[in-house]
Image (tube, rainbow, N blue to C red):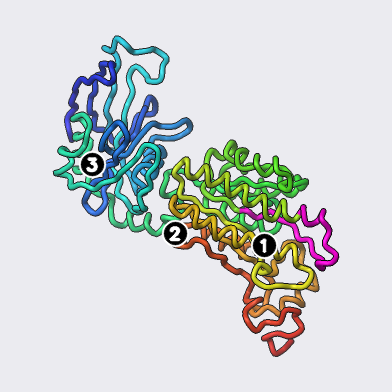
Amino acid sequence: MLKPKTIEADWGGHLVKLTWIAAAAPPEKDVTSVHGVCFYEGKIVLVRVKTRGYNLPGGHVEAGETPGEALHRECLEEACAEGVIRPVGMIEVSHENNPNFVPGGKYPLVGYQVFYRMDITACHSFIRNNECTARIWVEPVELPHVIEDHELILCAVEAALNCGPVSNLTIEKTKEENGMPEKQNGHPPAVLVTGGSTGIGRGIALAFAAAGYRVAITHYQDGKAAAAAAEELSSLSGVPCGVIEGDLRKLETAEATVPEALRILGRLDVLVNNAGIGLYGRIQELSAENLDSLYGLNFRAPLLLMRDASRHMIERGIRGCILNITSSRAERAYPKDVAYGGLKAGLKRAAEAAALDLAPYGIRVNCLAPGAVLVREPEPELDKFAETVPLGRIGLPDDIGHAAVWLASGQASYVTGVSLRIDGGLILPGMPEDGSASWNPGV
C-alpha cells in the first residue's frame, strides 16, 4: 500500500495542502470530485479538457449523486466509456493554511478527491462536447510524460495498477448486461412512458419496472387506473412511480411533459411515446375536429417529446433510447384508416429521420408496430379474429413490453431507425386484409 504523501499547490491564488491517502472506500461526506484511472486493453484513457490539458476523466459530484454514480457519469460524458469500478484512494484537499479560503463557500475546509480504477467494458465512439475536445490512450509508463496535473495523480495511477483488473468473470457479466444502465452507471435508469395507465402503455411500463428502471407515466382523465398502475410499478421497481396527468393534444401540455418527468426522475434514459387515440372513417367523412385530435396526440406530441428528451440526453451525455409506438397500420393500408394509419406512417418516417439526427450522440430511435393487442377484458370477437393470425392468438401488452425493454438494452445497441412489427404475422405478404380466409385450414 502506498504511504501518505503530501505536497502544497497554488490553485489560482489558493494555497492548498494535498495529501494522498490509500483507501478502500470513499468517505461519507465532503467528497468534492471523482476521477477515474480507466483501463482498456492495457492502456489508460486521458481526455483533453479546455484550459486543463490532458487529464484523467472526472469532475464534481452533483446533488443527489454518490461518488460512484458521479464517476460513471463523468466517464461516460468525457471519455464515452462505461465499465466496472473500484475505489483506490483519495487526495485530501486542505484549505487550513489558505488565507483566501471562504468559509461556507463552494468548498469545505477539508475535502476529498476520490479516485477509482475502471475496467472499461463498453468503449463508445468519442463525442466532442463543450469542454472535452479529445481522447487518447497511453501506455502506463508513458502517462507521466503526457498528463498535465500535479504529481499526486501518479499515486492514484500507481494504486490503480497495483490493485489489478476486476475479474474477467465480473467484466464479462457486465458486458452481457451493458444495455442495463443500472449495472453500468451505478444507479437505476429512468423511463417515461406516455399513456402508461392502461393497455399497451401499462404493459410497457411494467416491463421496464420489472427490469429495474425508475418509471414515470402519463395519463389523461384516468386517475383511478393510473393510481393502480403506479402502485404496481412502484412495487416492481422498488421506487415510487411518477404520475403526470395532462392532455397531450394540447401544445402546452406536450411541451411541459418532459420537464415534469425530469423534475420527478432527475434524468431520462428512455422515452416511450405510446399515448394515442384511434379514430376511423372514410376520407369523405373526415372531420377537421377529429383530424386535429389525431394530429395533436398521435404525431405532434411524440415529435415534441422526442425533441425535449433528446436535448436533455445530449446535454447530459446520455446515450439514450427513444421508442415510438406506431402500428402495423403504418405499413398496410385499410379502408376507413386515412387519418390514423396515415399519421402512424408519418411517425414511423419521422422516427427514421430522428435516428439519423441523433446517431452522432449515441441516441437510438426506433418504432414498435403492434398488430391486434388485447388491452381490455377478453372479447368473443377477438377470439374469432385470433384464428386469422398466423401465430394463432391475439397479442398481449406484455409482448410489446418485452420488445421495448430489449430495444432499450445494450443487446440492441446497434439497432436504430427500425420499425419492429409485433403482430403474430398478421400482415405478412399473402395474408388477407379482411380476415375472410386464413393460413389455418380449419378456419
**Figure label count:** 3
Of the numbered discs 1 and 2, the one sitting upstream in the chain is 1
Q: Which residue is mark 3?
A: 160
Question: Residue 289, how many percent across, how many down?
Answer: 82, 53
Q: Which residues are magenta?
A: 273-293
Identity of the residue furthest to the top in this view: 99
Question: Residue 403, how many percent across, how many down?
Answer: 56, 63
Residue type, label 1: Lys
Residue drawn at point x = 48 percent, y = 57 percent: 409
User: Which of the labelled discs sits on residue 344, or is there none?
Assistant: 1
Q: Is residue 282 magenta?
A: yes
Q: What is the C-alpha distance between the residues marked 1 and 3?
A: 52 Å
Residue type, label 3: Ala
User: Which of the labelled discs sits on residue 413, or is there none?
Assistant: 2
Q: Quadrant of residue 435?
A: bottom right
Q: Is residue 212 left or right of residue 166?
A: right
Residue type, label 2: Ser
Of the residues tagged 2 and 3, which is closer to the observer?
A: 2
Residue drawn at point x = 72 percent, y = 43 percent: 246
Report if the CB atoms under discs 1 and 2 are less than 8 Å apart.
no
* Element assignment for label 1: helix
Of the numbered discs 2 and 3, the one sitting upstream in the chain is 3
Q: Nearer the viewer, residue 1 or 306?
A: 306
Q: Nearer the viewer, residue 179 or 348?
A: 348
Q: Is residue 125 above or below residue 53?
A: below
Of the numbered discs 1 and 3, the one sitting upstream in the chain is 3
Q: What is the C-alpha distance between the residues marked 2 and 3?
A: 30 Å
* Element assignment for label 3: helix
Identity of the residue furthest to the right in this view: 285
Q: Quadrant of residue 58?
A: top left
Q: What is the C-alpha distance between the residues marked 1 and 2?
A: 25 Å
Could you tell me which quadrant the N terminus lies in? top left
